[in-house]
Image (cartoon, helix red, strand yellow):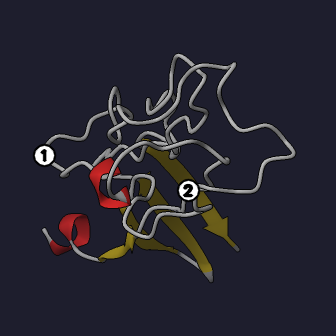
Amino acid sequence: MRALAGGWQLAAIYHLQSGQALNWPNAFYYGDNYDDILLPRSERDRERWFNADNFERSTAKVPAAFHRRVFPQRLPKLRADYMNQLDLRLTRGISVPGKRRLEFTVDAINALNNVQWNAPNLTPTDTNFGVVTTQRNEPRWLQFQLRFTF
């Protein structure tokens, strides 16, 4: 039984990282407080990442290139989606007669298949303003490796 079930090694890497900072264009915002843009995590989804209600959406009324910047470039409390990923590696080495060795490895990248979304659209005149349209990370994938050392 030990020859079949023994000799396995497991390694894991856990990634936890805050989301990327969002670089906002110059925009007219008519709200009272920039904190009103932030939605609680329970209300946030891909279709509405932040509260886009008080922004000027008309192309004829947005700030032109010669306007002085009125909207901050970054909002400290609002970021893109965070990274939450677990990578696993399972390895088994088998001695072969002589000075040879066979090693079998399985890698599970993003083993729990957690999705990390890309940054939302930050152009107020775009119809997808405040919407996340793409996935940032790779979905789960498995990689198998067989190595013979002689």
Tell me where residue 82 appears, x and y as whole percent: 38, 59
Please tell me in which quadrant of the rendered image residue 90 appears: bottom left
Observer able to see residue 86: no
Which residue is located at x 58 percent, y 62 percent?
72
* Extreme residue toward the right, this view: 66
Q: For mark 2, what is the residue?
A: 22
67 or 18: which is nearer to us?
A: 67
Give above or below for 67 relative to 33. Answer: above
Please tell me in which quadrant of the rendered image residue 84 appears: bottom left
The quarter of the rendered structure image containing the N terminus is bottom left
Observer able to see residue 24: yes
Disc marking residue 5: none
Q: How many marks?
A: 2
Q: Separation of disc 1 and disc 2 at Cα? A: 20 Å
Tell me where residue 78 appears, x and y as whole percent: 40, 59
37 or 113: which is nearer to us?
A: 37
Which residue is located at x 43 percent, y 71 percent?
94
User: Taking 112 as reference, is 23 left or right?
Assistant: right
Q: For mark 1, what is the residue?
A: 42
Tell me where residue 61 appears, x and y as whole percent: 65, 26
Crowd around label 2: few <14 · some 14–19 · many ≥20 (10 Å): some
137 or 67: which is nearer to us?
A: 67
Give above or below for 87 relative to 30. Answer: below
Residue at disc 2, secondary structure: loop
Which residue is located at x 51 percent, y 67 percent?
103
Instruction: Give whichever of discs 1 and 2 has the lower sequence position.
Output: 2
